Image (spheres, rainbow, N blue to C red):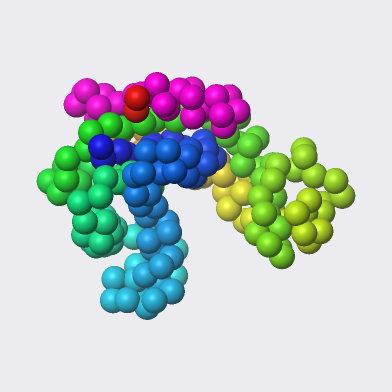
Amino acid sequence: MNIILLGAPGAGKGTQALRIEENYRIKHISTGDIFRHHMRQQTDIGNLARSYIKKGQLVPDEVTLKIVEIALEDAGKINFMLDGFPRNINQAKALDGLVAIDKVINIDVDLKVLTDRICGRRNCMECGYTAHVSTLSDGVCPKCGGEMYQRVDDQEDTVRSRLEVYTAQTAPLIEYYEAQGKLASVNGMGAPDEVFAEIRKVLG
C-alpha cells in the first residue's frame, strides 16, 4: 500500500518511518532527505530549491511537487511511504492527481509535549547522535564522548514558530484525508514501541 505519514515536528515520524519500512518493505520517501540530496548533487531542481532557501523563503509548491515526482519515478512500482509531503492542501490535491494513496497515518502528540521534547533535544558534534537533555550527563555524548549541542532549529522561539506553521498549514490535512476515509490517528505520546504497536493495528 501507499502511505502518508503525518505529524508535527518532534512527533516521532522518523523513528516510526524506519520501523514501517523495515517491517512492511515499503520505500520511505522523506522530502527533507530528497531536498538535501538534490542540493548536494547540484541538480537543476536542487539549485532552484536552494535559491529559495538561501533567501529564507519557503520552496514553492510546484518545486516541491517536482522533486516528489522524481522520487516517485525512481521508486517505480514499489509501495512507498511519504514523510514530509504533502504539507498543505494544495500539495495534497496535486498528489491526488499523481498517485493513489491508501492510508494516511497521523501521529498525534500534544503540542506542549512536542515543545518540551524538541527543545530538550541535543545532537553530538562528532557522531550526530541525538538524545534528550534529561538523559545526558555533563553534556557528553554517550556513544562517542563528543560534545552535545542544541541546534538552532530546536531553540524555543524557532520551535514555537515551526509548530504554528504546522498548525496553520499541515493540520488541515487531517480533515482532508478524514473526509476521504483514509485517515487513521494514533497516540504518539507513548514510547516508540507502543506507538508502533498502534500503527501495526492500522496497517495489519
Q: Which residues are magenta?
A: 176-202
Residue 200 placement, left or right of 193: left
Residue 68, compared with residue 115, is above or below; it is: below
From the viewer's perspective, is 122 left or right of 53? right
Q: Residue at x 82, y 51 (%)?
A: 139
Residue 28 image point, x, y percent: 38, 49
Judge whether residue 51 can be spotted in this image: no
Q: Residue 3's spot in the image, x, y percent?
A: 30, 38
Q: Image quadrant of residue 37?
A: bottom left
Position of the N terminus, as image quadrant, is top left
Residue 96 in the image: x percent, y percent?
A: 16, 42
Q: Quadrant of residue 43?
A: bottom left
Residue 166 in the image: state x and y as whole percent: 42, 40
Residue 40 visible at all: yes
Q: Quadrant of residue 119?
A: top right
Quarter that holds the C terminus: top left
Pick whichever, 75 or 168, lies toward us.
75
In the rendered image, the residue lying farthest to the left is: 97
The residue drawn where x is 43% and y is 65% is 36
Q: Is residue 98 magenta?
A: no
For image coordinates 62% across by 56% down, the residue present is: 152
Q: Residue at x 19, y 26 (%)?
A: 180
User: How many numbered discs?
Assistant: 0
Magenta stretch holds residue 181: yes
Give the farthest residue toward the right: 138
